Amino acid sequence: MEAAKRRDLLRDDTEYERCMSEAVIFQMPQQLRTLFCVILLYCNPTKPVDLWNSFKAHMGEDFMQQVDAETAEAMAFYAIDEKLKEQGRSCSDFGMPSPTSVPYSVE
């Protein structure tokens, strides 16, 4: 299996995880959400839900000033879906659940 990975015959999301990990250090949450959308739209990660779960707290940090962590994550997920809709796509296109409505304004 490792030999197949080295020959690029198998894919994993390591490079996208590394990219997001680096971005967490110096990017604002809104920029992280945009980067996540770019990865979804142009890089075709194999496990987008796992990538979301790894970085959802960071992508929702700006909302945590107003609401609890769970609501902040829901707001971040909703904001990501809205960004994807601007490109004619949605979270469900990537095997992710559709976001629930959020009781707060997402900007």
Image (cartoon, grey):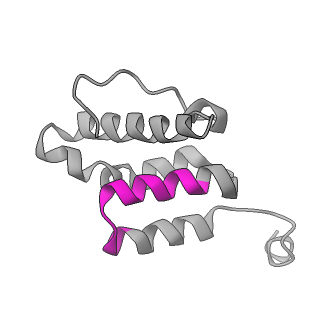
Instruction: Please give left or right for residue 104 compared with residue 89 in the image.
Output: left
Residue 38 belongs to magenta span? yes
x, y (%) of residue 52?
A: 47, 48
Whether residue 45 is visible here, answered yes or no, is: no
* Residue 11 found in image quarter: bottom right
Establish if 55 lies above or below 23: above
Instruction: Pick the quarter of the image with the N terminus.
Output: bottom right
x, y (%) of residue 2?
A: 79, 74
Q: Nearer the viewer, residue 4 or 93?
A: 93
What's the magenta bit mostly, secondary-structure-wise?
helix
Q: Residue at x 32, y 40 (%)?
A: 73
Q: Residue at x 46, y 35 (%)?
A: 82
Q: Nearer the viewer, residue 11 or 84?
A: 84
Instruction: Please give left or right for residue 35 compared with residue 101 in the image.
Output: right
Residue 28 belongs to magenta span? yes
**Numbered range of the magenta stretch:** 24-39
Instruction: Please give left or right for residue 104 compared with residue 37 in the image.
Output: left
Q: Residue at x 28, y 40 (%)?
A: 107
Q: Residue at x 24, y 52 (%)?
A: 61
x, y (%) of residue 44?
A: 70, 53
Q: Nearer the viewer, residue 36 or 14?
A: 36
